[in-house]
Amino acid sequence: MAAFDRARLAALMGERGLDLLLVTSRHNVRYLTGGYCYPLYQWDAHTRGSQYLPFFAIPRDASAPTAFIGRPGEREVMEEAGVKVGRCHESAGIGTRPAAMKTVEVLRGMGLDRGTIGVELPSLPADAWDALRGGLPQATLLDAVPVLDAQRAVKSPAEIDLMRRAEVLNAESLAVVLEGGHEGDSTAKIARAVEHEMRLRDLHHLYALVCAGPSWFRAPTERLRWQRGGVLHVDTAGMLAGYLAELCRTAVLGTPAALADRMLAGCRALEAAVLPVLRAGERARDVQRAGDEFLRGHPLGRYGKFIAHGIGLVHHEDPVIDAGAHGVLESGMVVSLEMEFRHEEVGHVKIEDLATITTAGAELLVPTQDAWVVSRG
């Protein structure tokens, strides 16, 4: 991962009045260190009676040094990984409270134990919070999540390329599974097949929600099976180097009903209606408005729904796109576009694509679904 934009972060911290950031969440530590994660805690940070909790201290002043507070032995691991974070300090033990207490000691030594400090409240355990509050009596602790969300919202070209590669691998996995499906396959079997194909492509599998019509139930199960003439969609996500690639495609076993055809065409037309609004400088709420206006004028609009949201290192991140959103779209943002219709006679027809925003408009990371995925089974 490329180094983050320090000037942008300093500006966002200034808007929030933060003198220092204390970053603790796995995704933000990974982002701000250029991709680093302690190998043992790649997917689960828990240990006996506590959990691994790193602290990455970043002053607003770009000329001031940063500091990383990790577990015993972490300095050597970071040096081997070539991570440049100022200096790595090691706590006395593995756990949240030892890490927080060491952080207090380091901040005092750096003269950063006062002023306004931003912390990630949703990912800061209570014992670590108590240690920070007790050890930094001259500091004001505020939630830094809005700053970090805004920082990650604009992706670098390297990040976008990484997400595009992940989306291509996701699309390849889905194509193999959907084209090779058979009558009677359970939604659980199809979900397992998606996971298998992702692993073959070194894409970390996160989930596969499978819906076989006319049911709207999407959790994989042996109870529901793909029937001839029936539609089926797979809504899935994979991860590459920490970045998410969400995609949804709808397939048919045999020949789709005329109503199903109109629903899939509606998904494509809905996406086409919102893409022109996805450009830098547009208001985020206008994207939602374009989708809602399309549905109000569509013959099947009462069965339709449009959802859009930012995506990157987490599933839903900035930009927020809904009727009440206040943000403005910027070049480099990546959004997920979800177009769907639900009808009791057919089931749940859905398309989901990722698009990056530029000054010229939106660019889909992979081509959208322009026709039925037809199973050979």
Image (spheres, rainbow, N blue to C red):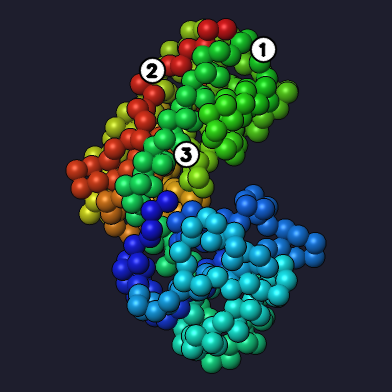
Q: Is residue 302 visible?
A: no
Binning the other alpha carbons within 10 Å of mark 1 as few (below 14), some (14 to 19) or many (20 upward) gives few
Circles 3 and 2: CB atoms closer than 8 Å: no
Q: Earlier in the sequence, mark 3 or mark 1?
A: 1
Q: Going 22% across and 54% down the picture, which residue do you hit?
A: 281
User: Which residue sits furthest bottom?
Assistant: 138
Q: Going 45% across and 36% down the picture, which residue do you hit?
A: 166
Task: Locate residue 76, reporting x and y percent.
Answer: 60, 62
Q: Secondary structure at mark 2?
A: loop
Looking at the image, residue 151 lies above or below residue 102: above
Q: Earlier in the sequence, mark 3 or mark 2?
A: 3
Q: Which mark is residue 361?
A: none
Q: Amino acid at mark 1?
A: Gly
Q: Is residue 375 visible?
A: yes
Looking at the image, residue 108 lies above or below residue 54: below
Real-space Cα separation, disc 3 to disc 2, in angstroms: 21 Å
Please name the residue that numbered disc 2 is placed on. Answer: 371
Q: Left of 174 or right of it: where is 221?
A: right
Q: Earlier in the sequence, mark 2 or mark 1?
A: 1
Q: Which mark is residue 245?
A: 3
Q: Secondary structure at mark 3?
A: strand
Q: Amino acid at mark 3?
A: Ala
Task: Locate residue 108, reporting x and y percent.
Answer: 55, 88
Real-space Cα separation, disc 3 to disc 1, in angstroms: 28 Å
Identify which residue, 28 or 354, lies in the foreground.
28
Q: Amino acid at mark 2?
A: Ala
Q: Going 73% across and 23% down the picture, which residue do you hit?
A: 222
Q: Secondary structure at mark 1?
A: loop
Please name the residue that numbered disc 1 is placed on. Answer: 184
